[in-house]
Image (cartoon, grey):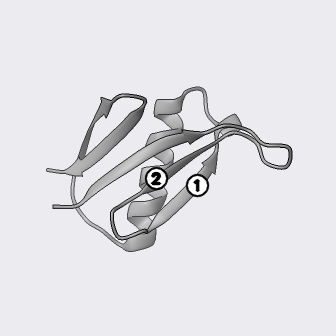
Amino acid sequence: MKAIRTHYLSATNTKPSRVVASDNDDNKVTVDMCLYDSFEDASVAAVDLLVRKMDWRGDLVHGGFGEDLFFVFV
């Protein structure tokens, strides 16, 4: 079963705040937080990009744990 984690990265001197979607195989995608209304919206967009990048298929569900969101295929 593939699980995808999204987490928030604070802004730095050179980069805006971001959301990273990654799996345990170190596949990852980063999106700028400023393009979205919420962390959840940015997370969904990042996961969608990662799923398309990896050419994975299936329906996803998600839930939170701490400050992160996790997505799994049903």
Q: Give the camera-side residue of 71 and 12.
A: 12
In the image, taking residue 67 as reference, residue 34 lies left or right, namely: right
Residue annotated with mark 1? 30
In this view, the residue farthest toward the right is 13
Q: Are marks 1 and 2 in contact (CB under 8 Å)?
A: yes
Assign a secondary structure to mark 1: strand
Residue annotated with mark 2? 21
Mark 2 Cα-neighbour bin, 10 Å: few <14, some 14–19, many ≥20? many
Q: Which circle's residue, 1 or 2, is located before the other in the chain? A: 2
In the image, taking residue 54 as reference, residue 58 lies left or right, namely: left
Q: Give the camera-side residue of 47 and 70.
A: 70
- Residue 14's tag is none
The answer to whether residue 50 is above or below residue 11 is: below
Could you say which quadrant of the image residue 18 lies in?
A: top right
Type of residue at label 2?
Ala
Assign a secondary structure to mark 2: strand
Instruction: Tell me the residue at 32%/31% (across/down).
Output: 64
The location of residue 24, given as percent across then percent down, is: 33, 63
The location of residue 23, given as percent across then percent down, is: 36, 61
Q: Give the camera-side residue of 30 and 9.
A: 9
Could you say which quadrant of the image residue 56 lies in?
A: bottom left
Instruction: Tell me the residue at 39%/72% (across/down).
Output: 54
Instruction: Tell me the residue at 38%/62% (across/down).
Output: 51
In the image, taking residue 37 as reference, residue 59 lies left or right, namely: left
Mark 1 Cα-neighbour bin, 10 Å: few <14, some 14–19, many ≥20? many
The location of residue 2, given as percent across then percent down, is: 23, 61
Disc 1 and disc 2: Cα gap in Å?
6 Å
Instruction: Tell me the residue at 44%/42% (across/down).
Output: 44
The location of residue 73, given as percent across then percent down, is: 20, 53
In the image, taking residue 39 as reference, residue 6 lies left or right, namely: left
Type of residue at label 1?
Thr
The answer to whether residue 39 is above or below residue 52 is: above
